[in-house]
Image (spheres, rainbow, N blue to C red):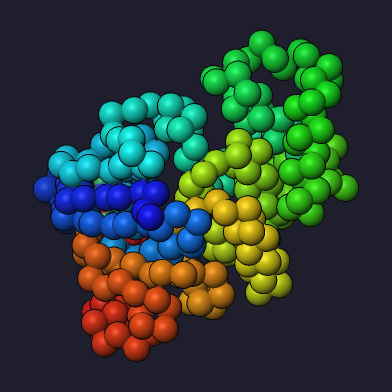
């Protein structure tokens, strides 16, 4: 069964066709990778799932509900969370506070500033956030300022901030970009562990090692459209895919 169904999505920016009749079906519980050369439209497509951009035409259905014309926090409430290409964290707050914020937002249905003074009194939220930091291997650093983290650790923190909202669909835009091989392998292990909980994931990824380690299915985009789809093995040998990368 597919949890996300994208049909006929088009998006232009001042005459540039960034998305051209994109169709995509993402199966429940699977890891679906989207690959393709720079400028193919991968991030634009993800932006259309989270309320950052509205397609010009087409439909995006998540578990029977349209994700279009909704505010980002509403989409979040439906169970869709996203890890951005550049980590979006609160650099001046501690790691624990960074994870408590989305935990509050998830529980209360909206982001409210008035919980900030009560942060120490919220044992339940605090425990949940700490548990999440443990899961991504950052519990020992819980009191550190998030801004001081390495790039790889910032990504791990951001993942904890997403997971604490108990998403059903997790969108990851280049989760290993700029990481060392060791950090990349840690991230693969972490994503595999998360996979055991049955969260569906869409991963935009350049690193083929990551794609082949994680993905059940791969969609290849080039020039705003999906040019090939299949298992990692099928994609590996597809001449159209090789051509897209060489031509891109
Ligand atoms: P990818 O993530 O596959 O590298 P993007 O989705 O970021 O590609 O970009 C697809 C195309 O759309 C590119 O040509 C890019 O320059 C253009 N684009 C993306 N976002 C915008 C925007 N906000 N305004 C204008 N052009 C954009
Ligand atoms: Mg991108």
Reply above or below: 130 against 150: above
Q: Nearer the viewer, residue 147 or 153?
A: 153
On the image, which quarter does residue 160 sit in?
top right
Q: Nearer the viewer, residue 74 or 47?
A: 74
**Left of 226 or right of it: where is 26?**
right
Which residue is drawn at the image coordinates 67% and 60% (left, top)? 193
Q: Nearer the viewer, residue 62 or 110?
A: 62
**Left of 185 or right of it: where is 25?**
left
Considering the image in quadrants, where does the N terminus appear?
bottom left
Measuring from the top left, give residue 227's x and y in whole percent. Answer: 23, 71
Reply above or below: 233 against 128: below
Q: Note whether residue 4 is visible.
A: yes
Q: Note whether residue 37 is visible.
A: no
On the image, which quarter does residue 123 sit in?
top right
Considering the image in quadrants, where does the C terminus appear?
bottom left
**Left of 224 or right of it: where is 182?**
right
Measuring from the top left, give residue 87's x and y in whole percent. Answer: 57, 47
**Left of 92 or right of it: where is 219?**
left
Q: Nearer the viewer, residue 198 or 13?
A: 198
- Residue found at the very far left of the displayed protein: 15
Task: Report the number of numbered marks.
Answer: 0
Measuring from the top left, give residue 176's x and y in whole percent. Answer: 57, 63
Which residue is drawn at the image coordinates 70% and 15% (left, top)? 115
Measuring from the top left, give residue 39's x and y in whole percent. Answer: 30, 61
- Residue found at the very far right of the displayed protein: 140
Which residue is drawn at the image coordinates 80% and 29% (left, top)? 126
């Amino acid at each position: 069964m597919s949890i996300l169904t994208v049909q006929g999505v088009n998006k232009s920016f001042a005459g540039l066709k960034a998305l051209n009749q994109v169709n995509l079906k993402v199966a429940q519980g699977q890891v679906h990778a989207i690959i393709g050369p720079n400028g193919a439209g991968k991030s634009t497509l993800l932006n259309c799932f989270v309320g950052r951009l509205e397609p010009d035409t087409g439909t995006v259905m998540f578990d029977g509900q349209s994700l279009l014309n909704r505010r980002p926090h509403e989409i979040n409430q439906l169970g869709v969370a996203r890890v951005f290409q550049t980590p979006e964290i609160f650099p001046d707050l501690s790691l624990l506070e960074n994870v408590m914020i989305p935990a509050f937002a998830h529980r209360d249905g909206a982001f409210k500033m008035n919980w900030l003074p009560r942060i120490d009194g919220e044992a339940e939220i605090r425990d949940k956030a700490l548990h999440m930091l443990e899961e991504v291997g950052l519990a020992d650093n819980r009191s550190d300022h998030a801004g001081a983290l390495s790039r790889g650790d910032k990504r791990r923190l951001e993942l904890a901030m997403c997971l604490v909202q108990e998403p059903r669909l997790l969108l990851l835009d280049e989760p290993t970009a700029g990481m060392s091989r060791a950090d990349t392998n840690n991230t693969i292990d972490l994503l595999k562990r998360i996979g055991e909980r049955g969260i569906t994931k869409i991963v935009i990824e350049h690193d083929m090692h990551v794609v082949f380690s994680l993905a059940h299915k791969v969609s290849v985009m080039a020039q705003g459209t999906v040019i090939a789809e299949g298992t990692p093995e099928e994609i590996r040998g597809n001449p159209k895919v090789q051509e897209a990368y060489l031509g891109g």
